[in-house]
Image (cartoon, rainbow, N blue to C red):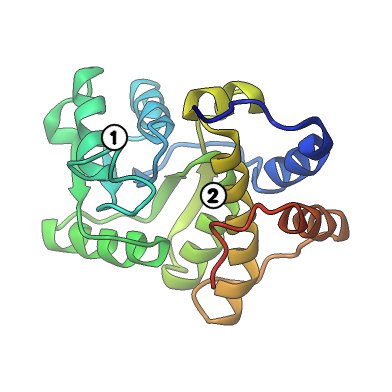
Amino acid sequence: MPSTVIPDEHRADVLTLWDYHDMKHRVRPADIAIGLGSHDIGVAVRAVELYEAGTVPGLLFTGANAPTTVKRFPRGEAVHYREYALEHGVPDEAILIETEATNTAENFTLSRKVLEDKGVQVASAVLIARPYQERRSYATCKKLWPELDIVCTSHRPPLDEYVAGIGDADFVISMMVGDTQRMTVFAEAGYAIPQEVPVEVDAAYGRLVAAGYTSRLVR
């Protein structure tokens, strides 16, 4: 049974990465909310909150499956998110899904195509990601869809509560370390705009890599 407790010796470094990926954007009304697929049902939770608040008139969920999501969401990430939204009162006509994307870049390129194919014009969007993917989502969207006016948000309970909800502390830490690495690697590859990585964030990342949280690093 995986542990849901963050080791005391790594807590400060994990919190450093957790805070770094929080864009701290002020959510404002937009033409649509785009929920990026992952293992985290909190994306759908936050999307429903925004719809119920009248922040957005519609939702677009994007995502197929990845090795980290297929057991949790066997019918596909976007499909499960849609089902959650329907179960919580969002009307079917307010939901679009994109079911082929297998990475963050495809989340945006294929979502854009879905909107174009449906004749839906959007100038602004609220991006919804797992908490430690906010910054990478922002950087990727700004590179691939630069004219879209975006803010980022997530369902962000306290860190320990979030880890307990996912059910595996090592998995969450490894995912967070992987997202931190991708900030630099994907910008260098041309998939995202560069983001400043403060010295303390880079140091925390290095210590967590040295501690063995390497399963989600890009090889």
Callout 2: SS:
helix
Give the residue at the far front of this rendering.
1
Residue at 65 percent across and 28 percent down: it is: 159
Q: Which of the two marks, 2 or 1, is nearer to us in this view?
A: 2
Which mark, residue 133?
A: 2
Give the x, y percent position of residue 29.
44, 37
Q: Is residue 193 above or below residue 198?
A: below
Answer whether residue 70 is visible to the viewer in this image: yes
Q: Is residue 160 above or below residue 108?
A: above
Give the x, y percent position of residue 100.
21, 59
- Front in this rendered view, residue 209 or 60: 209
Q: Which quadrant holds residue 161?
A: top right
Residue at 56 percent across and 27 percent down: it is: 162
User: The residue under label 2 is which amino acid type?
Assistant: Gln
Give the x, y percent position of residue 124.
41, 51
User: The residue under label 1 is which amino acid type?
Assistant: Pro
Which mark, residue 189?
A: none
Residue at 57 percent across and 63 percent down: it is: 217
- Front in this rendered view, residue 146 or 210: 210
Residue at 39 percent across and 41 percent down: it is: 39
Q: CA distance from mark 2 to mark 1?
A: 24 Å
Q: Which residue matches tag 1?
A: 57
- Front in this rendered view, residue 141 or 36: 36
Instruction: Say whether disc 2 or disc 1 marks the residue closer to the N-terminus.
Output: 1
